[in-house]
Image (spheres, rainbow, N blue to C red):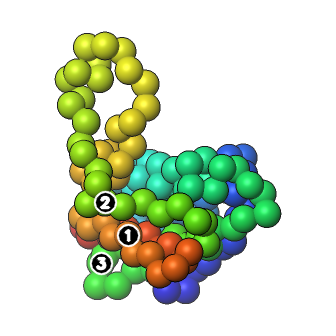
Amino acid sequence: MKDAIRISCNRHNLKVVRDFVSAYLAAYRLSDLQLNQIILAVDEVVANLIIHANHEDESQFLDLRMGMDNQVFEIEIEDDSKSSYQPSLYKEPDLQEHIRIGKKGGVGMTLVNRIMDRVEFTTTGTHNVCRLYKRIV
């Protein structure tokens, strides 16, 4: 993977990440829908890592790397937070119930899982890596 940035865990850096992903993907002439879906998925994962895993601690950092391999967009997001996301514990929410009761939040990873073709989370000690993959057609 060749394009990379490092950001501090401040929610103001979400725009930096969205712009970074958008600029990278501009060369691939995606439909607006596909471009915005990918940006949304990356934004959601980064927001979760900044807010929930790193508690907006600006002394903590996320490293993002992007690449394209055989028409598959790949992004890798790394941090060293003490908390890690465990996909095996994730229970997809009932979206109809969320709408019915007007609940806000709690559906981000559902969106990410539906938008991206593959989502991987790995943890070694306190080193966490999230990899997102999306075939570009």
- Amino acid type at image mark 2: Pro
User: What residue appears at the point 26 percent right and 60 percent down from the top-left corner?
Assistant: 88
Counting the numbered discs, the total is 3
In the picture, measured across the screen, residue 108 lies left or right of residue 89, that is: right
Chain-order first, disc 3 or disc 1 = 3
Q: Position of residue 42 (x, y in %)?
A: 47, 57
Q: Is residue 118 visible?
A: yes
In the picture, measured across the screen, residue 76 lies left or right of residue 112, that is: right
Instruction: Work out whether residue 134 or residue 127 is closer to the camera in this orientation and state it.
Output: 127
Task: Spot the residue most to the right.
Answer: 59
Quarter of the image for residue 98 reads top left
Chain-order first, disc 1 or disc 2 = 2
User: What residue appears at the point 28 percent right and 19 percent down from the top-left corner?
Assistant: 99
Question: With respect to residue 95, does 4 lie above or below?
Answer: below
Regarding mark 3 in the picture, which secondary structure is present there?
Answer: loop
Q: Position of residue 91 (x, y in %)?
A: 24, 45
- Amino acid type at image mark 3: Gln
Q: Quadrant of the C terminus?
A: bottom left
Instruction: Work out whether residue 58 or residue 134 is closer to the camera in this orientation and state it.
Output: 58
In the picture, measured across the screen, residue 122 lies left or right of residue 128, that is: left
Q: Which residue is mark 3?
A: 71
Q: Nearer the viewer, mark 3 or mark 1?
A: 1
Q: Position of residue 22 (x, y in %)?
A: 53, 59
Regarding mark 1 in the picture, which secondary structure is present there?
Answer: strand
Q: Position of residue 70 (x, y in %)?
A: 29, 85
> Gap in Å between the C-alphas at discs 2 and 3?
26 Å
Q: Which residue is mark 2?
A: 87
- Amino acid type at image mark 1: Phe
Instruction: Work out whether residue 7 or residue 128 is closer to the camera in this orientation and state it.
Output: 128
* Residues at circles 1 and 2 in contact by the CB criterion of under 8 Å: yes
Instruction: Work out whether residue 69 or residue 128 is closer to the camera in this orientation and state it.
Output: 128
Question: With respect to residue 118, does 68 lie above or below?
Answer: below
